[in-house]
Structure formats: structure tokens, C-alpha cells
Amino acid sequence: MTTMSKSGLCQKKSFEDYQCFTYMHDYTTLDEPSTFRVASFSPAWIKAMEEEISALTMQGTWCLVPRPANTNIVGSKWIYKIKRNSYGTVSRYKARLVAQGFSQEAGFDYDETFSPVVRHTTVRLILSLAAINGWSLRQLDVKNAFLHGDLDEEVYMKQPQGFEDSSHPDYVCKLQKSLYDLKQAPKGWNAKFTGYLPSLGFKMSHSDPSLFVKISDSAIVVLLLYVDDIILTGSNSQVIQEISYKSNGDLFISQQKYAKDLLVKAGMESCRPCPTPSKPHTQVLPTDGEPLKEPSVYRSIVGALQYLTFTRPDLAYSVNTVCQFMNNPTEVHFQLVKRILRYIQGPLHYGLTYSSSVPVSVSAYSDADWAGDITTRRSTTGFVVFLGSNPISWQSKKQGSVSRSSTEAEYRALANASVEAAWIRQILADLHVFLPDPPLLFCDNMYALALSSNPVFHSRIKHLDVDFHFVQERVQRKDFLVHYIPTDE
């Protein structure tokens, strides 16, 4: 065989050793490195790590001690993240030292790990109130939040890679403050922060422990806590730093950048859009199709889709459907996920507009199919709750047991919607916002409305759990008003 090299038509290229390191440096400045060795070639990442170590040192996070005998030593790892603004440009390089909490032992170096976070409905409710009342909004991100939490247990950790003490390389870090990825870190930070808020005049809501309200003669200040992210709003613009609204006072929120990143993650950024997130009357069995070789990819994408429903109620039903196959996803199930992603590709700009010119009233619309799940023959509940004309809560969820009739399925859905409306009313009461009229519940099933308002029909649904009769009691007390609405509307 005659090749180009034998014919003298091409020459070998010579590469110097330093060129490989030059390319590595350029790569790490644009992408997030996965190891310390890769990050160590970038001055930007080195500076980010030095800033992290400086913050940990100033906080007194640990002290170096000789390695104790017969003690669990937790590992440490560097995590690198490029922070970008809403336009996608680089904001800063963030290097975070985390503890490898998976190596902790229950009952030895940690006990409780639970930490409450604010409900998504509460966030949307506060945003809607801010738009209606013209309140200013401010978002805060607490820097090194978990480092402020106190530890009740003795935890020892290896020295951070690249920053070992040269005089005591065999020593370990005895943690005096909490650190990211420790199992008790979220609980410690939440206890520290929420324990301090009462000294500032804030009171915790009984309906949502992550909602705090401060009421004075001149103003009301509302604080929402989601791990280390804080939303502040209130009636006094001098207390809260203002952000931009629309010219008419409306507030628009969307997850457009998150949706784009999700399409890139799934490798479908150039896919062709489709008009709906799922085909009508699609019925798929758990056993349809061949099992996926890498089910973790399916679970990762579906988990990301769940977060996207924060501002996209049009995805609620389809995402709930694909969530039911997380245990053993197949190729057929993954086609359903791809359909959702193709739909997202079209209306990337979709979001929620919270109008400023609406009355403060609560209304809910509920619906249900009957025996829609071909595997279990259970029905699916769907409802949406509005504050004025602003949607603040919605759900699409398979019911817990089989319904004997379509009326029973509709009654269950109406009960779930009434529970959500009652909870929202309690949140409003904690905010000293009182409704002039009872919440309105709309349903397209006349028999379900009769069951909720007339105790004479109770014998027909005596087999239902007691909690579903919550709506019947509330309607009789005039806490709710129920109305019929045609299916077409």
C-alpha cells in the first residue's frame, strides 16, 4: 500500500511538551474541571480555591490536630462551578471545599439531618402579593452559609488537597463549624439562621416554617428561606432594595436559561419542537420496551424537569407521568421524556406573569380523569389555585386508591384542591392579609358538588377515607363556596 507519508506528500508535526499544558489551561478556564489536578493549571481556579481557604480560615472552620485513633476520618474534595448571570456570561469562578459526607457514620458523627425549605407555592404566593401591592423585591445569597452552623458532634476531616500544612502533613482537621456536604450541615445552618431572626422582630409562620414575617406600624417585611437563598419583600421601599418591574407594575418570572441548559444537558438543543408535551390519550405500561442501559440519565433529566414545573404548569401532567417510571425506565419511557423536551424547545420563553391589577381573592379549579392508569386503574387528580388571576399552586398526581365512579374521582380531586386553598388562606392570615370572601372551588361534576354540600348523600361515599370529607365540612361552615363550571370552560 502506498501511503501519503511514504510518498513524501505530508510531514510529521512536532509537538513541544509545553503545548499540551497550554491547551489544558485554555480548556479549564472555560469549563468546570472535575479534579484538583486539572484545576491547578488555571490561575482563575487557583485564585478561587485560595479565596475559599481564606474564608474557611477566617470563619475558624477547623483546627489541625493529630490523627486520633479508632476515629472515622471524613474525606474532602474540591467542587468547581462557573457562576453565570441571566445572560449566560461568566460572573465568577467558584471553588468550594466539601466534606465527603457519605463516609459519615450514623450515631457516631451525625444524628439528625432534616432541614425545612420553603414551599414553591409560598414563593409564588409572595411574588403575586408583591406584584399586587407594588412591593419591592430583593434576592440574597448568603456567602458560605453552611459555615455558620454549629456542630454538636466531633467530626474529623482530611486536609484539603493542595493546601496541606507542610509542617504537619499527617494531621487532620477537627471541624469546629459545619461544612458543605456534611449530613448535618443544612440542619445546623437553618437552626443558626432561624434562631437569630426573632431578635430582629421576625415571627415564623405556623403554616410554612421557612416563611418569616415582621410587622410594624409603618411596614411589613416578608422573608423566605430556601437553604442559603433568601427572598425579601415588603411594603416599605426604604427597607427593601427595589428591582425592576414591567412598566405596568406586573411581575414576570421564567426559567428560560434553565430550560436551555436542560436541552443542552440532554443533547437536544437543536431538536425540532412539537406542539404538545405529550400525545393525547397516551397509555404506556411499565414493562413496555427494553430497559435502558443507563437509567441514571433518565432519572437525571426527569429530576431536572420536575424543577422546571416551578414556572411551567403546562408541564405538570406530562412530568408526573414520566416520574412514575423512575424505578425501571425503558426506551419507550425515554421517548416520552424526549417528547417533553421537544415541546420545551418551542416556547422557551414561557413563564408566569403576576398581574398587579387584580383583587385579593382565592379560587381553585379541580378536575380528574377516571381510571386513567391502565396498570392500577387509579385516577389522576389535577387542580390549580389562583390568587386573583395569578396562578400560585397546581398539581397533577395519581390518586392513592381506585375510585368506584367518576364522581368519586372528582370528589377526591375537589377535596385535595380545598386542602390547598385552606392552607393558602392560613399563609395569607400569617401575612395579615385577610380575604373579603371565602375561596371559590370550581368543579365540572354536578354530583361531586352535591356530595360536598349536602350531607344527605354521605351514605354513597361512606367507604372513603375520613380526610376526603374535609371539603364537605368546610362547605357546610361556609368556609368555601363551590360552583359548577362546564367542562368546555
Image (cartoon, rainbow, N blue to C red):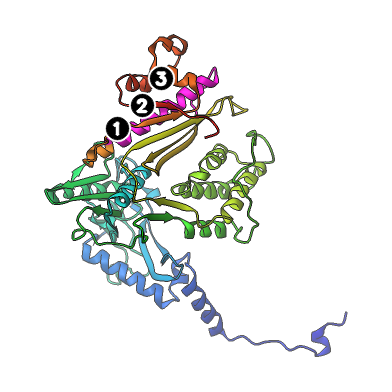
Crowding near the residue tagged with mark 1, few <14, some 14–19, many ≥20 C-alpha atoms within 10 Å? few
With respect to residue 69, does 2 lie above or below? Answer: below
Q: Nearer the viewer, residue 272 or 185?
A: 272
> Which label sits on residue 437?
1
Q: Between marks 3 and 1, how big is the CA–CA gap?
A: 19 Å
Crowding near the residue tagged with mark 2, few <14, some 14–19, many ≥20 C-alpha atoms within 10 Å? some
**Earlier sequence position, callout 2 versus callout 3:** 3
**Earlier sequence position, callout 3 versus callout 1:** 1
Callout 1 amino acid: Asp
Q: Main secondary structure of the magenta part?
A: helix
Residue 332 left/right relative to 184: right
With respect to residue 433, does 94 lie above or below? Answer: below
| Tag 2 near tag 1, CB within 8 Å | yes
**In the rendered structure, does residue 205 fall within the stretch colored magenta?**
no
Q: Is residue 70 visible?
A: no
- Determine the secondary structure under disc 2: strand
**Start-end of magenta stretch:** 398-426
Residue 422 left/right relative to 152: right
- Determine the secondary structure under disc 3: helix
**Earlier sequence position, callout 2 versus callout 1:** 1
* Closer mark to the observer between disc 2 and disc 3: 2
* Closer mark to the observer between disc 3 and disc 1: 1
- Determine the secondary structure under disc 1: loop
> Which label sits on residue 481?
2
Residue highlighted by disc 3: 452
**In the rendered structure, does residue 413 fall within the stretch colored magenta?**
yes
**Residue sitting farthest toward the right:** 1
